[in-house]
Image: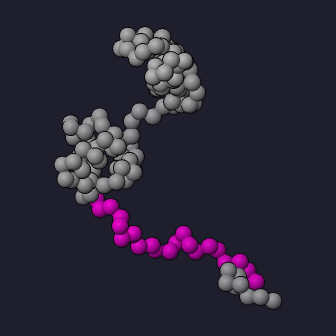
Amino acid sequence: MHSWRWQAAGEVIADQRPFVERNNPVNKRSETEYRVILSVCNSPRFNSAPPSQIGPILSNEGRYLDSESAIYCVLRKAKLTRFTTTIPNQVRMCYISSQPSQVKCEYYKLYMIENLFSRYLTGWRVHAEETRVDKSAIKKRYAT
């Protein structure tokens, strides 16, 4: 009979892994770093900007806060992530694509409206050129 390490005298020993004391990782963010990230993200300058925009702006100024994904983790931990869609048709996105025509160097503009929640196309239109009037008409048409 084999003597396995999780058996003692024929009985199975309970798992002791949850009770082991573990050291914190060396690269764990300190509480001050955590507070600095939150204070920068909540400052009036960056209050409505996502981390994908905060990082490059600070890099241009010669400051490095943290990586974009790490900033998202801090915001998620502090429950400060906003603009999460929970139902269909809550948030829509508009894409504009140039499609070739029969005439050389002339393109049609394809406007596509996509539902962020389901990733389905909810509408589309084709126009000869891209104008502000077309964009506003499409926004009004697919707003509801």
> Which is nearer the eye, 25 or 138?
138
What residue sits 21% from the left and 53% below the top? 63
| Residue 72 placement, left or right of 107 | left
Colouring style? one colour
Please give the range of residues in magenta: 9-31
Residue 141, image x, y percentages = 48, 11
Q: Is residue 85 visible?
A: yes
| Residue 25 placement, left or right of 88 | left
In the rendered view of the protein, which quadrant contains the N terminus? bottom right
Q: Is residue 113 visible?
A: no
Furthest residue toward left: 61
Magenta span main SS: loop
Q: Is residue 3 magenta?
A: no
Residue 123, image x, y percentages = 55, 18
Residue 41, image x, y percentages = 27, 43
Q: Is residue 29 magenta?
A: yes
Residue 8, image x, y percentages = 70, 85
What residue sits 62% from the left and 73% below the top? 15
> Which is nearer the eye, 16 or 120?
120
| As drawn, 113 above or below 27 | above
